[in-house]
Each structure stands twice: as structure tokens, then as C-alpha cells.
Amino acid sequence: MVTYKDNLDGITSELLQGGFFDGWPNTPSPQAHLRILQGSDALVLALGEDGRVVGYITAISDGVSCAYIPHLEVLPAYRGKGIGKELVRRMLAKLDYLYMVDLLCDPDVQPFYESLGMQRATGMALRNYDRQNCAGVG
Ligand SMILES: CC(C)(COP(=O)(O)OP(=O)(O)OC[C@H]1O[C@@H](n2cnc3c(N)ncnc32)[C@H](O)[C@@H]1OP(=O)(O)O)[C@@H](O)C(=O)NCCC(=O)NCCS
């Protein structure tokens, strides 16, 4: 059974070693992943029965008007079981007091977010791919 929590109590980089950032050419280490979680303003974790993290979502926010959701991922072996939707539902509930909640995603994932009440929008992005593994930052 998967359980959910919205803090990092007891979470170590060892519990993040399941293979996150699937498909990224330049993968952040579990230690960098933990720093990403520690630096986020809000997070929700999905934990497997052995206590390992099997999915997570983060948000950064000014706490007044807006939040941005940069990371959502469920480990491949755990996908298609409703965990991703539950992570988004829990995060949107936490951010419900804000005016703007934004994220960027590929077109194939737009129906997933639409089913959770979000609307399509246009956006802009900049990526420094040589820094994708977050090494030396934070
Ligand atoms: C997107 C993601 C978090 C969904 O997690 P999940 O636990 O599999 O999601 P759920 O089981 O709650 O929901 C699955 C639903 O989303 C749809 N879906 C998820 N990812 C999809 C994709 N890339 N393309 C099309 N449909 C997708 C499934 O078809 C399914 O639809 P259904 O409920 O109508 O059957 C997961 O696929 C993932 O980690 N992907 C890689 C990282 C990623 O793309 N993150 C989003 C960045 S914006």
C-alpha cells in the first residue's frame, strides 16, 4: 500500500534511489534530489511499503499570489495506479489559497492535468542543459 506525506521527516537520499528523473540525459543524484525537495516550498511524497519514495511533487511559491510546480514523477513500476493524480490533488489542495498555480508539460500529459481541473495555457521556458544534474548547486 502506498502512503503519502507532506514533509521530509525521516527522508534520506537512500530512500530516493529508485530511479527518478527517468529519461533525463543528465540525471541529478539522489543527494541533489534531496536538496531539490529541501529547497521546495511545498511537497508531497508517495511512499512504498518499504518506506522508499515512489513518487513526489514539489512547488515553489511566493506564499501570497502564485506557485509553480516544477517536479512531478512516479517511478515507472508504480505508474498507472492513481499515484500521480493523488499527488497532484494533494498539492492543488495545499495551494488552493493562491491565485495562480502554473506548470509546464508536454502536450501528451495535458489531458492528465485537465482531468484534475487545470487548463491549457501557453508559456515560455529556458533550459541550461549543462546544469541538468544540479551538481554543484544548493
Ligand atoms: C505523469 C505521471 C506523473 C503520471 O503518474 P501516474 O501515477 O502514472 O498517474 P495516474 O495513475 O494517477 O494517472 C494515469 C493517467 O494519466 C495518463 N497519463 C499519464 N502520463 C501520460 C502521458 N505521458 N501521456 C498520456 N497519458 C498519460 C494515463 O493515461 C492515465 O489516464 P486514465 O486515468 O484516463 O487511465 C507519470 O507518468 C510520470 O512520472 N511520468 C514521467 C514524468 C512526467 O512526465 N512528469 C510530469 C511532468 S509535467
Image: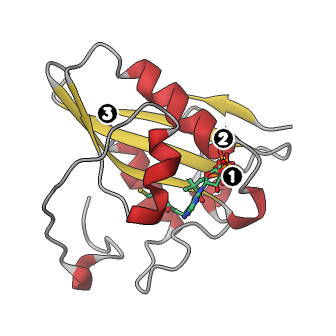
Q: Are marks 3 and 2 in contact (CB under 8 Å)?
A: no
Q: Amino acid at mark 1?
A: Val
List x then y, in percent, for residue 79.
71, 57
Name the residue type under label 3. Answer: Asp
The mark found on residue 101 in the picture is none
Residue 19 in the image: above or below residue 54: below
Q: Residue at x 13, y 61 (%)?
A: 124
Using the image, determine if residue 133 lies above or below residue 41.
below
37 horizontally vs 101: left or right: right
Say which mark, if any, is on residue 54.
1
Q: Where ligand 1 lies, by image quadrant? A: bottom right
Q: Secondary structure beneath disc 1?
A: strand
Question: Does the rendering let one see residue 7?
Answer: no
Identified by mark 2, the residue type is Ala
Give the image location of residue 16, x and y in percent.
Answer: 61, 58
Q: Which residue is mark 3?
A: 41
Cβ–Cβ under 8 Å for marks 1 and 2: yes
* Left or right side of 134 for 5: right
- Which comes sooner in the sequence, label 1 or label 2? 2
Cα separation between marks 1 and 3: 20 Å
Q: State which quadrant residue 106 falls in.
A: bottom left
What residue do we see at 77% from left, 44% from top?
A: 51
Count every numbered label the image shows and give the total: 3
Tag 3 or tag 1, which sits nearer the N-term?
Answer: 3
Question: What residue does disc 2 label?
Answer: 46
Q: Secondary structure at mark 2?
A: strand
Give the mark, 3 or 2, whose residue is nearer the N terminus.
3
Tell which residue pokes out farthest to the top in this image. Answer: 97
